[in-house]
Image: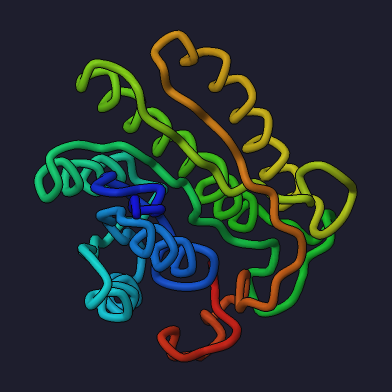
Amino acid sequence: MSDQRLLIDKSVVITGAGSGVGRAAAILFVEHGARVVCADVREDWAQQTVDLIAAQGQAVAQACDVRREADVQAAVDRAVREFGRLDVMYNNAGVATATDGRPHSLIEQGDDDFERLVGINLRGVTYGSQVAVRQFLKQGGGGAIVNTGSVAGMVGWGGVMYGASKGAVNQMTRGLAIEVARHGIRVNAVCPAGMMTNFGRADGGGFAPATADMEER
């Protein structure tokens, strides 16, 4: 009987892999045969993800603040060094409107809130896509980029600035998909609705992410 796993020996970088959607993706990707760099601004959380899936396949933890291009480049370089190439870039890291444990209306949004949302949700995806495309082209073309958008980027729901940042991610996905199609690179977005995670909590929720039911993406 043939192996039904979808990602056998594919080299993958997942940002925000220390908890929530990123952790779930890392577990699923490894179950399907991928080799994963679990990148997260909290390297200890990323390592917990690696520990959870170590018995199932190959994964390594990598510290990565997606607001820093050098960090994103380092995560991709780690995939190339450990696994020989990059096949999939999953730009998942993101934060919600809340910065102090509560949602902020648009008129309450300050410069720090704006910089945080745009820096992580949009600049992080931009850096991830740029670094991935450069690596794919260096390898001769082909590859896949997946971005975590949001239903809030499609309809008027949730925090205003959060929705605006995710709307930008959704549009970047469409535009980039057209731009790099001729190189055999596919670009798609997943757009979740509300989820029971500690996503957006200013303190990370105070949970131990290896066991928590509610985790930050």
Residue at the spot 54% in from the left edge and 73% down from the top edge = 216
Q: Which colour scheme is used?
A: rainbow
Residue at the spot 84% in from the left edge and 56% down from the top edge = 107
Image position of 31 (left or right of 98): left
| Residue reaching furthest to the front | 1
Image position of 134 (left or right of 154): left
The percent position of residue 16, horizontal first and vertical second, equals 43, 61
Numbered marks: total:
0
Q: In which quarter of the image is residue 70?
A: top left
In the displayed structure, 186 sits above or below 162; it is above
The percent position of residue 160, horizontal first and vertical second, equals 81, 51
Quarter of the figure that contains the C terminus: bottom right
Residue at the spot 48% in from the left edge and 68% down from the top edge = 24
The percent position of residue 58, horizontal first and vertical second, equals 20, 63
| Residue reaching furthest to the right | 156
| Nearer-the-camera pick, 115 or 211 | 211
In the displayed structure, 158 sits above or below 167; it is below
Quarter of the figure that contains the N terminus: bottom left
| Nearer-the-camera pick, 207 or 20 | 20
Residue at the spot 62% in from the left edge and 70% down from the top edge = 200
| Nearer-the-camera pick, 52 or 68 | 52
The percent position of residue 210, horizontal first and vertical second, equals 41, 86
Image position of 204 (left or right of 16): right
